[in-house]
């Protein structure tokens, strides 16, 4: 039995302003996104990229914000119908 499995690495980032107790959210329109609605910004991790690098890049691409030192707070595994998984 092989231990190899198709795995797609992604990130979701919560950006909080501690003074105002507000968070950054984005709206993803159903006409242009497979997963639509309000969500935290994030995206796929590219080959050779660390989790922290991918969060910094995705936040900048999606919001224009420059962040530093993102902190990992959790990991979620979504199994796919094809046998692979999103992490």
Image: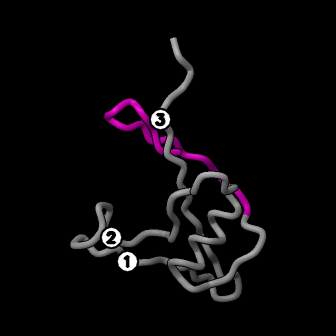
Q: Which residues are magenta?
A: 71-87
Q: Main secondary structure of the magenta part?
A: loop
Q: Is residue 35 left or right of residue 64?
A: left
* Secondary element type, mark 3: loop
* Residue drawn at 50 percent across, 63 percent down: 43
Q: Is tag 2's residue or tag 1's residue first in the polypeptide sequence?
A: 1
Q: Is residue 73 left or right of residue 58?
A: right
* Res. 73 image quadrant: bottom right
User: Gap between marks 3 and 2, in whole Å?
Assistant: 27 Å
* Secondary element type, mark 1: strand
For residue 64, above or below residue 13:
below
Residue of label 1: 27
Q: Is tag 3's residue or tag 2's residue first in the polypeptide sequence?
A: 3
- Verify whether residue 82 appears in magenta: yes
* Residue drawn at 57 percent across, 56 percent down: 45
> Label 2 near label 3: C-beta < 8 Å?
no
> Label 1 near label 2: C-beta < 8 Å?
yes
Residue of label 2: 37
Q: Is tag 3's residue or tag 1's residue first in the polypeptide sequence?
A: 3
| Residue 46 drawn at (x, y percent) | 57, 56
* Res. 18 image quadrant: bottom right
Residue of label 3: 6
* Residue drawn at 27 percent across, 72 percent down: 32
Nearer to us: label 3 or label 1: 3
* Residue drawn at 56 percent across, 58 percent down: 11
User: Gap between marks 2 and 1, in whole Å?
Assistant: 5 Å
* Res. 12 image quadrant: bottom right
For residue 63, above or below residue 4:
below
């Amino acid at each position: 039995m092989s231990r190899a499995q198709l795995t797609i690495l992604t990130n979701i980032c919560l950006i909080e302003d501690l003074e105002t107790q507000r968070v950054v959210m984005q709206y993803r329109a159903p006409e242009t996104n497979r997963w639509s609605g309000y969500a935290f910004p994030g995206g796929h991790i590219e080959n050779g990229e660390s989790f922290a690098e991918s969060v910094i890049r995705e936040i900048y691409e999606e919001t224009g914000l420059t962040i530093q030192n993102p902190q990992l707070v959790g990991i979620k595994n979504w199994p796919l119908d094809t046998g692979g998984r999103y992490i």
